[in-house]
Amino acid sequence: MSAPVSPLARFWAEFRRSPVAVAALLVVVVTSLLAIFAPWVAPQDPYDLTTLSLLDARREPGFVGSGGYAHLLGTDPQGRDLLSAILYGMRISLQIGLAAGTVALFLGTTIGILAAYARGWVETVLMRIVDLQLSFPAILLALVLVALLGQGKAQLITALVAAQYAYFARTAYGAATAERRKDYVEAALATPLSGRRVAFFHLLPNCLPPLIVVATVQIANSISLEATLSFLGLGLPVTEPSLGMLISNGFPYMMSGRYWISVYPGIALIVLIVAINLVGDRVRDQFNPRLRR
Amino acid sequence: MSGYVLQRLLQAALVMVAMSAIVFVGVYAIGNPVDIVIPPEATQDIRAATIARLGLDLPLWQQYLIFVRNLFDGDLGRSFIYNEPVLSLIAGRLPATLELVLLSVLSATVFGIALGVYAGYRPDSVLAKAIMAVSVLGFSVPTFWIGLILILTFAVNLGWLPAGGRGQTVDLLGVAWSFPTLDGLKHLVLPAVNLALFKFAMMIRLARAGTREVMLSDTIKFARAAGIRESTILRRHLLKLISIPIITVFGLELGSTLAFAVVTETIFSWPGVGKLIIDSIAVLDRPVMVAYLLLTTLLFVIINLTVDLLFALIDPRIRARGAA
Amino acid sequence: MAALEVDNLVTEFDTANGVLRAVDGVSFTLAPGQITGLVGESGSGKTVTGFSLLGLVDAPGRIVSGSIRLGGTELVGRPETELRRRRGAEIAMIFQDPIATLNPLLAIGAQMRMALEAHRSVSRREANARCIEVLDQVGIPEPRARLGSYPHELSGGMRQRVAIAIALLHGPAVIVADEPTTALDVSIQAQILHRMRMLADETGSAVLWISHDLATVSGLASRLLVMYAGRIVEFGNTAEVLRDPRHPYTRGLIDSLPGTVAAGEPLRQIPGGAPSLSALPPGCAFAPRCPHADVDCAKPVELHERGERGWRCIHPLGPERSDPFA
């Protein structure tokens, strides 16, 4: 008999078998690194107004600007180097996506497990609220919250979390309820161990697989939602251009042929989202026992 | 069965009441609405008069009650900005949105399910893999981006279709619709495709996942063992079995599509309710916001109700549970 | 004439771990009206054998070689359209868990009619009449009312009777039953077993009863086939095999039945576990667990046949050998 393999190693061995998923994971890792190290990698700091010159505005890719270097992807209406703007924009997108996703994960999981564990009227009330929210489209909720709370990173993250925690809650609740019914939980509850320990150490680990799947999807969704809101002018303030804002800035120029201002940030956004979704897809397929032949 | 229906109706009513209160409080409690309507230099008299006219000096709960009473009279208030009754404002733009949404949803569902079932039935075929690749794109790529690309490709570069606006309309039953005219259809195509793409991709994925699961199940094996023809199995077993998860998501996504119409209408300058709400949010035109949210909630509630009833029709186990 | 003749059937699976031979040269015959038991542990290949008979082996598995003759007609290698016509009509299958095999969204009558109309064109009235007939045959009370019932409204035992009824609709020459009573209560099991015996006698169908439970099979089947790691290791008349087993594995199976041990005594087990098909030893597959094994057992072992009896062992148990696991 071979030595026992850890679940993570097993998971990775299976994951490796899909070239698409591995490629997607690579893309996610690379873009994340680029985004984290943007201040060092980007040729220009797009927030530093002193380095901007309107003479450089709306120039095509390859144009050598007043900074003395070639703008590989062109410039935007404010004269910002598009490549740098995209890198910083991805940084913001990832920041917000991860922040919103993580907070929603914690909030939703807590609610879901609490509902499954507490049962009774707590369960009913909590899940009714969650269900109500699930039937309300995320974008509408986010729109209204942003409108009410005003613009800013914290407000945006709050809106995104409010729009998405329900998915986590429902998933955690479903998994926890199924686990709760299992004999080992009843057995654990019969011991002097406190209920909270049972919930934490027994229910939680078994709910993790579906939650991880939802998390990857929701992070991609957060990024997409934030971009949409920014595009509509309701996202982050103009001073911190996310990819969505860059795209919306370039929208009026598309008709006149200056497509790069919108297209390149758009491609960056798409690549990021699609990569995350592909990874999430693979993870989901791996966790689904019913698809195993 | 009737107990089930009654229960659902009651829930729906409760939801409407709760939502109306939440929406009203949420929208009216934040900030001072007067500041949008009157310029900052206005005198105190004008300010007081405006407040009195719009009823903004009353306590919130009184405003809410007046609001509810007006609701039953069919009066949803007057827009702060357009100074028009909100109801007529929304009613005027609703057909455009409905047209767009219905066309999108129908085409997305029909084609999505067809392709998805094929992809699930023959998962290893080249076509199936291509379908799945396309679905990942349709699913991940934000709607507004697809809209941009569509405009760029078909309107700017190829010049085949118009870049925005609604086409020629025809009066049917007293309402202006644009789909009966060729010009109207030309204007409908791009926004409808844009709006449909997400749902299309979702339907494909759902249908495929459901089909794969069902085809590997014992029910299908047993049917095959009985010598039943494949086409019969697909028709009578598969389609029925995947309809439940599909209808669930269909209902949810219908609401989502209605919401995303907001984005599509903005990009394509489609004169629908969605564009109205974006503009209203930007200027905090509260009556319009409240009315729109209530309308949307009502639509969702109706959709959920219909979905629940459809379930009961399809799945005998739900009928049995409901009657208990 | 035999209802079914299987000759050297080989079914393989193409997996990530290599090619697995789930059925390795299995041969047997089924006579009309006779119930034959196919006994083995999980992973022994008994279920795959059953599916192979119906041509229902899913990819990545396939029948590699051998012959399956149904009423004299060869089935292996025939096109799917032809196999489909025989499935359900000439050879039928009953599965283990009827809650999974019956569609919860369709009424019983609808599902039965589907199975009937697959091979015959009948009017609705004729179809219902035939359905009621078979439902009655399997002992379901008020069969006409049951046509409109849904699977979740019936008990487990009832559902399995419905599955058996569907198998009987066309009066097949062969019925393959794959663990049909495993999911049922013991008391219901007994009823179903009794009913199956009656049906085999009445209809003259040959029944292949696949199970891991030697106890139930021995009460029902007149002939026994014992399977291990894809091969038949012993076969013969049930009473004879039970009284006088020749293969050590068979002996082990019999001994692990609770009834063979006095109360208070520890239950007997066969040491070791079922072998993985990807790591089979050369020669006798049971050798690693067998106390009698020696060097000669590492060479491929043929089936020794003596009339209606047979065993695949070069050191068979006999009257002269006592219980090897004592």
Image (cartoon, rainbow, N blue to C red):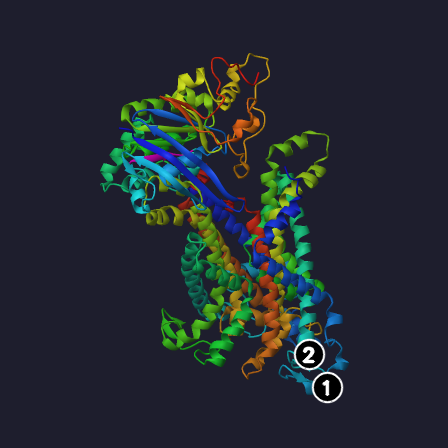
Which amino acid type is marked by label 1?
Ser
Q: Which label number is shown at residue B218? A: none
Q: Chain letter for mark 1, please.
A: A
Q: Is residue C153 left or right of residue A128?
A: left
The magenta segment: C90-95
Is residue B164 something that shows in the picture?
Answer: no
Local crowd size for mark 2, using a 10 Å CA cut-off: few (<14), some (14–19), many (≥20): many
- Same chain for marks 1 and 2? yes
Sort mark 1 into few (<14), some (14-19) or many (20+) by Cα contacts within 10 Å.
some
Q: Which mark is residue A66?
A: 1
Q: Which of the 4 image quarters holds residue C105?
A: top left
Image point (67%, 44%), residue name:
A6
Q: CA distance from mark 1 to mark 2?
A: 11 Å
For the residue marked with disc 2, what is the amino acid?
Answer: Asp
Residue toward you, B6 or B235: B235
Chief SS of the magenta region: strand
**Residue B193 higher or lower than B165, as above or below:** above
- Asked whether B279 falls inside the magenta stretch, the response is no
Question: For the residue labelled by badge 2, is the local secondary structure a helix, a strand or a loop?
Answer: loop
- Residue C94 falls within the magenta-colored stretch: yes
Residue C241 visible in the displayed image: yes
User: In which quadrant is the N terminus of chain B drawn?
Assistant: top left
User: Is residue B97 or residue C49 the one in the foreground?
Assistant: C49
Where residue B262 sits: x, y (%)?
53, 68
Residue C77 appears left or right of C233: left
In this picture, is A262 found above or below A55?
Answer: above
The image position of residue B28, as x and y in percent, is 63, 63
Query: Would residue B209 be found to the left or right of residue B220 on screen?
Result: right
Mark 1 or 2 closer to N-term?
Answer: 1
What residue did someone put label 2 on?
A: A81
* Dot 1: element: loop
